[in-house]
Image (spheres, rainbow, N blue to C red):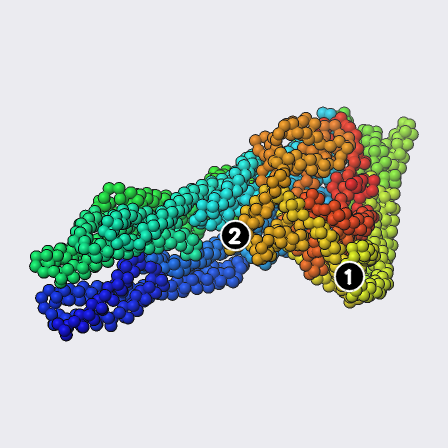
Amino acid sequence: MEEAAPIAERFYAAHEQLLPWLQKIEPELHGKELAGQESEAQLKELQTMCDEIKPLIESLRETGSQLSALTSGPSSATFTDILLSDSKRFDLLNEQLHNRLERIKMQQLKSAEVLSEIDELVEFFSETERQIVESDIVSSDPEKLQDQLQKHKALHDDIIAQKSRVRDLQSTAKRLSRESTFEEDPLIKDRLEDLRQQMDGCIKQSNDQLNAIEQALPLARIFHETLASLVCWLDKMEEKTGGQEPIALTAEQLQEQQDGIKLMKQSIADEKPAIDRLGKTGSALVKLVGAEESEKLHELLEDVTSRFDFIKNAVRERSNCLDEALLQTSQFSDKLENLMDCLETVAAAVTKVEPVSAYPEKLAEQIADNRAIVEDMDKKLTSIKAVKANAEELMSQSDAMDGSSNDIRDKMFNLLDTYEMIRKATEERGQVLEETFHASEKFWDNFNNLNGTLKDIQESLADQESPGFEPTTIKEQQETLETLKEDLDAAIVEGDILHEAGEELVGLIGEPDKPEIERNVEDIDALLKGLSESWLARQRELDEALQQATTFHEELMKLLVWIQTMETRLDRMGVIPSDVAALSEQISALKLLTDEILPKNMEIQELNFTANELTKNNASEQAAAVKDPVGDVNRRWDALNEIIADRMGKLQKALIGLGHFHGVMDEQLLWLDSVKQQLDDVSPVYGDPKLIEMELAKLKIIKIDLRNHQPSIDFVLEAGREIIASEGGADARDTREKLEELNRKLESVLIRTRDQRLLLDDALKNAKSFHEELQDVLQQLGEIDGHLTTAPPVGGLPETAKKQLDEFSELEKVIENLSPKVKFLLVNGDSILEKAPEGATERLRQNLQSIRTRWDNIRTMAADRRTKLVDATRQSEGFQDQLTRSINWLTNMEKLIGNLRPVSRVLPTVLEQIEEHRRLQEDASSQKEVMSHLEKTGTHLKYFSLKQDVVLIRNLLGSVQHRWEKINMRLTERTRHLGTGFNQARQFKQEWEDLTNWLTENEAALDAETAIHNEPETIRSQIQKHREFQKMLGTKQLAYDTVNARGRSLKERGPKSDTPVLQEMLLALKNKWNSLCGKSVDRQKALEDALLQSGQFKEALQALLDWLYKVEPQLTESQLVHGDLDTVTGLMEQHKVFRQDLLRRASTVAAVRKAAADMLDRSEEDTTHLQSQLIDLTTKWEKVENLSAEKEKRLADALDRAEKFHSKLKEFQDWLISAEQHLHSQGPVADVEQTLLQQQRDHEVFSSSLLEKEGLLNECLQICGDILRQAHPDATNTLKRWQVTLRARWEDVANWARQREDKIGDALDDLQANARLLDELLLWLTQTEQILTAEDQKQLPEDLAVLEQLFEDHQLFESDIQIHQAEVEKLTKTSKLNPEPASTTSSLPHRGTFLRKRKAEAKKAPEPAFRNPKVAHLFTKWRQVWLMAMERRRKLQDALDHQNEIERMKHFNFANWRDRYLKWMNNNKSRIMDFFRKQDKDHDGKVTRKEFIDGILKSKFPTTPMEMKAVADHFDDDGDGYIDYKAFVSALKPDRGEKTKMMTEGERIHYEIKRQSEQCSCTRQFRIQKSAEGKYSFGESQKVRLVRILRSNVMVRVGGGWMALDEFLVKNDPCRAKGRTNVDLREHFALMEGMAHFKPRVTGAHHDTRSQLRDKPFGLNLRQQQLKQNSSDAEVHQIFARPGAALRPKPHTHANDRTSPCLDLGTSSHGGSRPSSRGSSRPPSAADSDMSEAGEPQDAKVASKTTVGHSTGVAAQPVQAAKASAFTPGRTTTSSRLPKPAVATPQSVKKTGSFPHLAAPSSSAAPTTRPKKPHMGSSSGLDSSHVTTQQK
C-alpha cells in the first residue's frame, strides 16, 4: 500500500487535471460548427491543446496500470473504470478533432478547385468581352460582314459552351455546400455571383453583336447591290443630261428630242423604287453600323439622292422647255393634240399615284412631287389659254354645223375637263398630304418620345437593386418605385394620345403602311403591359421583402430582449448557497429557467432560417448586416446555456457535498428517462428541409441538455465511485447498480442521439439535394419558359424562318434531355409525399405542382412555337416562290411591253396591235388575283415578322407593287394610245378609201365616156356635164388636201415602219388624183376639139378665153413667190403642174387658130367680132406663156435665194451651238490672277470671233428681210419666226459674253484691291498682336471699378476687331481652296434631309486651305489675334465675375439658397433623395465635398462653384470632408415658421399660361382667361378646356386626348399660326370665272413643313452645343461657322460661357450656325435664371446689371450690320438668321364666255414659279414688272 499511495496520488492528480480540461473542450467540440477559417482556427487550437495534454494522458494510463497491478478488488475496479472512462473520452475527442480537420482539408481542396475554375471562367468571359468590345465595328461592306459573322459565330459558340460549364460549376458548388457540415463559403458564393454577372454581360454583348451583324448582312447586300446599279444608272443619265443638244428649231427635231426625254422620264420612274429601297435599307443599316460607317452611308445616300434629284429636276425642266417649244412651232391641230396627250399622261399619273405614306421623309417627297405637277400645270396654263383663243377664233370663222368645228369644240371641252380634273385631284391630294404630314410628325414624335420614356423606365426597373434588409431601405426602394409608377402612369396617358394619333394617321395613309403603324402601336402597348407587370412584380417583391424584414427585425428584437432578460435573471441568482434548502430552491429555479430557455431554440432556428432566406441571393458583405446580429443572438444563447450548465453542475456538486448523492442520482436517472422520451418524440421527416432542420433543432436541444448535464453526471459518477470505495456491503452494491444503470441509460441516450442525428442529417442531405435539383429544374424550366415567352416574331424570309426553326430544334433537344430529369423528380417527389407526414409537404407539393404546370406549359408552348415556325417557314417559302414567279412574270411582261412596236397609224397593223394588247390585258387580269394574294401575304408577313425582315419584305413587295402598277399604267397608256391611233388610222383610212373610191369611180366613168357625138347640141351638153364634173372635182380638192395633210401628219406621228405604207397610200391617191385630173383635162380638150370640129367655133373660142382670163391673175408679178425653201419648192411643184396643163392646151389653141383662119377665109359675113376674139386669144395666150416663163424665172430666183438663206442659216446655227457650248464649258471665274488673265485672253479671242460672226448674222437677217418683203403669205410666219429666233439667240450669246467679260474685269479689280487690303490688314494685325501681348503681361487689378473700366475698354477694342472682320472674311473666303458649293434650299426637303442634318450637325468644320500664302498668314494671324482677344476678354470676365461673386458672397444666406434650391427641385419634379443617391456611388450614405459640388453644378441648378463651397461648408459642419445624407436632408428642411412655399400645380399652370401669352406682341392678343381651377377659356369663342400638368408639361384637353400648350397655341393663335395659315398671294388677285389656280394649301403649310423638318433637333441640343464650343479647338473651328456673325461681348456667370466671331468661308457647320429649336429647359447660369432673382442680394443684381450694360451698347452694332447686309448683293445670308424674300406673281385676267373653264390669256400673267436662270439672249430671266419682292 505504501508503494501504491504515491502512484495513486499521481493518478488522482492527473485525473483531477484532465477532468476540467475535458469538461472545457467537449462543449466547444460538440457545440455549433463554425464556418471557413474560423472553424479551422478553432479546431487547430483544440488539436494543439490535445497535443499538449497527451503527456498527462500517458501518465494517467501508466499510473492506472500500475495501480491496477498493485491493488485488487473494488479499488482496482475503481482505478480501471476511471482510466477507461478518461481514455475513452480523450480518444473520442481526439478522433473527432482529427476527422473534422480532415473534412475541412478536403473541403478546402474542393473549394480551391472550384475557385480556380471560377477564376478561369471569369478570366475567359472578361477576355471574351474585351475581344467583343475591341472587335471591329459592324461594317457596311457585305464581305467584311460575312467575315465578321463567321468569326463572331465561332466566338459565340465558345461562349455558349462555357455557359453549360458554368451551370455544372454551380451544381458542383451547391453539392460541395450540401455535403459539407459547415456553412456555405461566402467567397465561393460571391465569386459565383461575379461569374454569373460576368457571363450574363458577356452573353448579352455577344448576342447584341451577333444580332447586329446578322441584321446588317442582308441589308448591306441589298444596299450595295442597289447602290451599284443606281450609280451605274446615274452615270449614264448624267452623261445623257450633260450631253444634250440645245433645243431644236424644227418640229421634227423637237419631236425627236421630246421622245428622248420621255424615255428618260420613264427611266427615272423605273428607278424611283430603287431610290426608295436604298433610302429605307440605308436608314435601317445606319442604326446597326459604327459611327464611321454611318458617316460613309450618310454621304453615299446624300450623294445618290442629290444626283437623282438633280437628274429628275433637269429632265423635268427640259421636258417643260421642249413642250413649250413644240407648242410654239406646231400648228393649231398639233398643239391641241400635244396638249391633250400631255394632260392625259399627267391625268393617268395623278389617278394612279402611290398611296399616302406614313413617314415624314416620304411624305415630304410626295408633297414635292405633287407640287411639281402643280407647277407644271401652271406653266401649261398659258398654252391652254392660247389654244383656247385659237379655237374660239377658228370656230367663229367656221360654220356652226361644220364637222371640224364640232370636233375642235369636243376636243377643247375634253382638254379643259382633263385640266380641271388634274387641278382638283392635285389640290385634294395636296390637302391630304399636308394633313397627313402633320399627323405623321405628331405620331412619330409621340412614338419616339414615348418609346424613349419606356426604355428609360425599363432600364430603371432593370437597374433596381435587390430588396434591402432594413425596412427603411425597402421603404425608400418603394418610394423610388412609386416615382417610376408616376412616370408609368404618365406614359400610359401618352400611350392613349399615341393611340389617337395612330388612329388619325391610319385613317389618312394608304394600305401598305397601315400594318406598320398598327404594329408600332401594338409594340408600345406590349411594352407598357410588360412594364406594368414588371412594376407589379417588383411591388410584390418589395412588399414581401418588407414584411419579411419587418418580421425578422421584430423577432430579432424580441429575442435580444428575452436573452437580456434571461442573462439578468441568471446574474441575480448570486453565489452558490451552502445550505440544502437554498440549493434545492436554486436548482428548482434553474430547472424552470432551463425549461424556458431550451424551447426558445426553435425560435432562434427560425430566425436563422429567415436570415438565410433574406441573404441567400446577396453578397457576403451585404449579408453581414443580417448575419452579424443573428450570430450575436446565437453566441449569447450558447453562452446562456453554458452558464446554466456550469451553474447546475456547481449546484449539484454542492448538494452532493452536503450528502444528497442518491437524491442527485435519482434526479439524473429521471432526467435520462425524460430525455429518452424526448428522443422518442424526434422522428425522421421527409420532404421539406425546413421541417427536418426543425427536428434537428429539437435534437440539438436534447444535445444541449445532455451537454449541460454532462458535468453533473461525471461528478455523480465520480462521487459514486468514491462512495463505493468508501462503503461496503449492500450499500456499495446498490450504489454500483445505480451507477451502472446511470451509465447504461446515458450510453443509450447518447447512442440514440447519435443515431437520430445521423438519420436526420441523411434526411436533410437528401432533402436538400432533392430540393436543389428541384430548384435547378425550376430554374431551367423558367429559362426555357422565358425563352419561349419572349421569343421574337417569326422570320418573314425563308432563310430567317429556317434558321429560327433550326435554333428551336436545339431548344427542343434541351427540353427532351430535361424530360427524364423532370419525370424522375416528379416520381421521387410523389414517393416523398407518400412517406412524409401530413402537413410537412405543403412546400414540396407546391414545387412539384409548379414543375408539372411549367412542364406542361413549356411542352404546349413548344408545340405551338414549332407549329408557328413550321407555318412561317412554309408561308415564307410560299411567299418567296410566289414572289419569284411574280417577278419572272413582271420581267417577261416588261420585256413584252418594252418590245412592243409603237402604235401604228395603219389600220390593219393597229388592229393587230389591239388584238395583241387585248391578250396582254387578259394576261394582266389573270395576274391581278395573284398580285392581290401576294400583297395580302406580304402584309401579313410585315405585320408578324421580324423587324429586320420587314425592311427586306417591304422593299421586295414595294418593288413588285411598283412594277405591277407601272405595268398597269403602261397598259392603260397603251390602251389610250391604241385608241387614239385606231381612231386616227380609221379616219384616215375611211377618208382615203372614200376619196379613192370616188376617184376610181369617176375615172372609170371618164374612161367609159369616150364617145363624142358630132352634133353640136350633144357636144354642148357633154361639155356642160363635164364642167359640172370639174366643179365637183374642184370641191374634192379640199378633201384631197385634207387626206394628204392627215397622211403627212400620221407619217410624222407614227412609227417609221408606217412611212412606206402611208407613203404608198398617199402616192396612190396622188396618182389617181393626177390621173383623174389629167383625164378630165384631156376630156375637156377632146370635147372642145369636137365642138370646134363640129363647127361650134365660137363656143370653143370662148372656153379658151375664159380659161386664159382665169389663170392670168395667178401668173402676174403681184403673186409673190419668195419664201423659205419648203414654200418655194411647193410653189415650183404647183407651177410645174400648170406648165403641163398649158402645154396640153397649146394644140387646142393651134386648132382654134387654124379653124378661125379657115372661117375668115371662107366667111362672107362680118368677121370683125371673130377677128377681135382671135386677136384677144392670141394676145392672152402669148401673155400667159410669157407670164408663165417669167414666173418660172422668178421661182428659180426665189429658189436660189431660199437655198442661200438656208445655207447661211445652217452655218450660223452651227456656230451658235458651238458658241453656247463654249460658254457653257467655261466654268466660274477664277480667283487666281494668272488663271484669270488666261481666261481674259481666251475670252478676248471668243469676243473677236463673236464680232466676226455678227456680219454673218446681219447677212442672214438681211437675206431674210429681203425675202420677207417678197414672200408668199404661206412663208411669212416662218420667216418672221426665224428672224425672232436668230436675234434672241444672238442676244443670249452676246449678253452672256458681255457678262463674262464684266465678271473677269471685276475679278481683276477685286484682286488688286484685295492685295492692297491684305497688306493693310497684316500691318494692323501685327500692331494689334503687340498691344494684346503687352496688355496680357500686366497683372489684373482686384478693384471692381478698375476691372469694369478695363472690360469696357476691351469691348471697344473688340468693336474695332469686329469692324475688320468683314474685310478678313472677304479675303479668306475668296482665297479658300475647294469651297463647298452652297446648297440650294428647295421648297420641301427631299429624301435624305434628316440624314444630312444629323451629319452636318455632327461634323466639324475642316481646317481651311488657301491659295495665297499671305492670305493663309492673314488667317493664322487673325485667328491668333482673335484667340488672344478672347482670352483677354475671358480673363477680364473671370476677374470681374470673381469680384462680383466675392461681393455677393459677403452677404451669403443659406436660407435663401435653400429656398431657391427647393423651389428649383419642385419645379423640375425632382427629389432630393434621388439626387443624393445618384451621387452616392458606393451607397454608404455619404458623399465627398467634390462629389456634392460637382453633382449640383452638373444638375444645371443656377449657382456658382464659390457659392457651392459655402453651401458645402454648411453641410459639412464637422469638417471631415463628407456630407451625410441625414445631415443633408435635415439642413434642407425649412425652419419652423419659415417653411418654403412651393408652387402648387395650379400656380405652375397659371405661370406657364401667363408666360406663353406674354410672348405675343400683337395689339390684340389671343385671349386666355381662367374660369375655374384647372379650367381656362381660349380665343374669341372663350371655349372652356381642361388644363393639367403631365410630366412637367402643361397639357390642354383637346377632343379625346391631350395636347401640349405651346402646340395648342400654335394651332389656334392666329399670331403664332400665320406661318401656317397665310394664303397664297395669288388669292388676292382676281381669278377668271369658273377657273381656279392650283392652291393645294402649300404656301404656308409648306413653309411650316420645311421649318418643322429643318428645325427638328437632331444631334446636340443647345446646351450641349454650348458646352462643346467651350474648348479652344472647337471655338477655332467655329470661327468660320456662321456668316455675318459679330464678336459680341456678353455678360457671363460662368467663365467658360462665351461666344466667338465667325468668318464665312463657304463652309457649313450647322452646329454653330443655326441654334437648336429646342433649348434647354433649365437656365445655364444664375444670372440668366429667373430663380436667381429671388435668391441674389440686391448688390449682386446691380453688379450684374452693370456688366450687362457694358455689353449692350456694343452688341447692337453687329445686329445692325447684319440687317444692313441682309440683302446686299454678293453677301451670303443664312435662312435661320434673316427672312427670305418671297416672290409673288400678281395676275389679272379677263373673262370670256366661250368656255366655262378657261379665260383668255392675259398680257400681265407671269409664271408662278421662282425665277430660273436667264435664257440665252435675254439680260434677265424674269421681267421686273412680273416680280414683287416682299421682305418681312
| Mark closest to the chain's N terminus, 2 or 1 | 1
Q: How many numbered marks does the figure carry?
A: 2
The residues bearing labels 2 and 1 have C-alpha atoms spaced at a distance of 43 Å
Give whichever of 1015, 1320 is nearer the camera.
1320
Q: Which residue is mark 2?
A: 1485
Please report the residue visible at 27 percent of the width from the left and 53 percent of the height from the top.
Answer: 577
Please report the residue visible at 82 percent of the width from the left and 55 percent of the height from the top.
Answer: 1349
In the image, residue 827 sits, relative to residue 134, either above or below, namely above
1020 displayed left or right of 1526 = right
**Residue 939 visible in the shown view:** no
Res. 1831 image quadrant: top right
Check residue 1340 in the rendering and tell me which mark sits there, or answer none. Answer: 1
Give whichever of 589, 308 is nearer the camera.
589
Q: Secondary structure at mark 2?
A: loop
Q: Horizontal and vertical percent for residue 970?
A: 58, 41
Check residue 85 in the rendering and tell me which mark sits there, or answer none. Answer: none
Q: Secondary structure at mark 1?
A: loop
